[in-house]
Structure formats: structure tokens, C-alpha cells
Image (cartoon, rainbow, N blue to C red):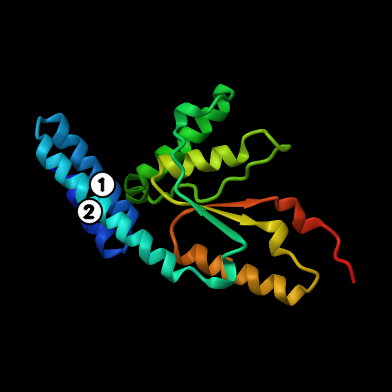
């Protein structure tokens, strides 16, 4: 049976329209039921969550702004934290971000909030995109990669309109967002 904290978390996430948090807690309940030997119930809960996520994913495709289709790549990464080969200090930072997100109800009860932003810096091939994929997978969120080099145009108004659309998407759609090739913003505009 679900714990009192899980029930409260389910209710809070339902009334705050936090679908992913609701699904995460439901999967925690399923895992607990499986550990108690209630495999059929755990299987049913996981099936309900998977079906709801699939239906929600289909709705997300319909609601996705057409103007952003070439600028934002959407994926459901399957890369787990175990795939990451990194220094211990970096791995600990990533684990902390994951832990804060999963325990956000506890943080909120103490007047704190989980991290919502991370700056990944380094030359090409150092694992920035892989890290974003791992975070998305571990947090059970989609990964949205914004192609910044395609976002910036020589027309300032066009660029700002696209940026506005992207930030509206971020407000509306819970996911991990990676601004790829961010150094393109600092490039010169030709007149």
C-alpha cells in the first residue's frame, strides 16, 4: 500500500497539474508493491503509467509549435547514469541534481526548491549532451535540444520572436532543455 507521503504527493501533483511528478510517485508505489510481493498490482500500475505517458506524448506532438520544429529536437533518451564515465566530483553533482528533483516535495516542505538550471561547459566531446540525456532519462523527462545556431538569424526581431516561443514552451512543457551550440549567440551578425 502507498505510504502517507506518497498519497499526499500524488494529491499535490494532481492539483498542481504536475503529470510527471504524479507518474514518478505512481511508479514508486509500483516498486514498493513489487517488493512486497504484489507483482500483479505493480504490473498494473506500471501499465497505467506507461499508457498515460504514451497518450500524453501523442498530445505533445500535436501541441508542439510548428515554427519550432526545425529548432528544437525532441527525444526520449534511454541513457542511464551507469553509462557515464566521469570524475567522481562531477558524478556526485549530477546525482545531487537527480536527488533534488526526486525529493522536491521534501525540499518544498522546508522552504527550498530543487535546482532548475545547470550550466554544462566544455569543448566538444566532453559529455555535455550525454549528461543532458542522462538527466532526462533519470528524471523521466523528455529531452528538448534547442539548436541555437539555427535560432540566431541576422534579423534581431526574428531571433527574439523565436526565443520568446522557446521560453513559452519551457514554461508550458516540463522537460530537460539543452541549448546546444550556445556559443552561436555571441557570433557576429552580418549586415
Residue located at (51% from left, 35% from top): 94
* Residue 105 spot, x, y in % from top left: 32, 49
Secondary structure beneath dot 1 equals helix
Residue located at (55% from left, 24% from top): 85
Vertical placement of 150 versus 99: above or below?
below
Q: Quadrant of the N terminus?
A: top left
Residue 9 visible somewhere in the drawing:
no
What label sits on residue 25 in the rendered view?
Answer: 1
**How many neighbours does mark 1 have within 10 angstroms: few (below 14), some (14-19), or many (20 or more)?**
some
Q: Is disc 1 in contact with disc 2, using a CB cutoff of under 8 Å?
A: yes
Q: Earlier in the sequence, mark 1 or mark 2?
A: 2
- Tell me where residue 128 sits by quadrant: top right
* Residue 186 spot, x, y in % from top left: 80, 56
* Residue lying at the far right of the rendered structure: 191
What label sits on residue 101 in the rendered view?
Answer: none
Relative depth, front residue between 190 and 105? 190
Residue 60 visible somewhere in the drawing:
yes
Q: Quick check: 63 left or right of 165?
A: left
- Tell me where residue 40 sits by quadrant: top left
Residue located at (10% from left, 30% from top): 37
Relative depth, front residue between 127 and 9? 127
**How many neighbours does mark 2 have within 10 angstroms: few (below 14), some (14-19), or many (20 or more)?**
many
Separation (CA) of disc 1 from disc 2: 7 Å
Q: Quick check: 58 left or right of 162?
A: left
Vertical placement of 56 versus 86: above or below?
below
Label 2, on which residue? 10
Secondary structure beneath dot 2 equals helix
Residue located at (49% from left, 38% from top): 134
* Residue 83 spot, x, y in % from top left: 49, 28
* Residue 144 spot, x, y in % from top left: 53, 54
Q: Quadrant of the C terminus?
A: bottom right
Amino acid at each position: 500500500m502507498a505510504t502517507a507521503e506518497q498519497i499526499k504527493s500524488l494529491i499535490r501533483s494532481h492539483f498542481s497539474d504536475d503529470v510527471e511528478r504524479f507518474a514518478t510517485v505512481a511508479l514508486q508505489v509500483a516498486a514498493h508493491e513489487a517488493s512486497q510481493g504484489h507483482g500483479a498490482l505493480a504490473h498494473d500500475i506500471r501499465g497505467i503509467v506507461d499508457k498515460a505517458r504514451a497518450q500524453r506524448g501523442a498530445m505533445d506532438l500535436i501541441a508542439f509549435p510548428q515554427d519550432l520544429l526545425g529548432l528544437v529536437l525532441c527525444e526520449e533518451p534511454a541513457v542511464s547514469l551507469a553509462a557515464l564515465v566521469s570524475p567522481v566530483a562531477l558524478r556526485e553533482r549530477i546525482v545531487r541534481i537527480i536527488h533534488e528533483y526526486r525529493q522536491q516535495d521534501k525540499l518544498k516542505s522546508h522552504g527550498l526548491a530543487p535546482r532548475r538550471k545547470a550550466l554544462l561547459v566544455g569543448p566538444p566531446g566532453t559529455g555535455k549532451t550525454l549528461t543532458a540525456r542522462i538527466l532526462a532519462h533519470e528524471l523521466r523527462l523528455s529531452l528538448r535540444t534547442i539548436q541555437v545556431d539555427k535560432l540566431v538569424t541576422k534579423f534581431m526581431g526574428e531571433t527574439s520572436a523565436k526565443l520568446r516561443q522557446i521560453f513559452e514552451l519551457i514554461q508550458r512543457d516540463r522537460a530537460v532543455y539543452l541549448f546546444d551550440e550556445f556559443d552561436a549567440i555571441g557570433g557576429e551578425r552580418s549586415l
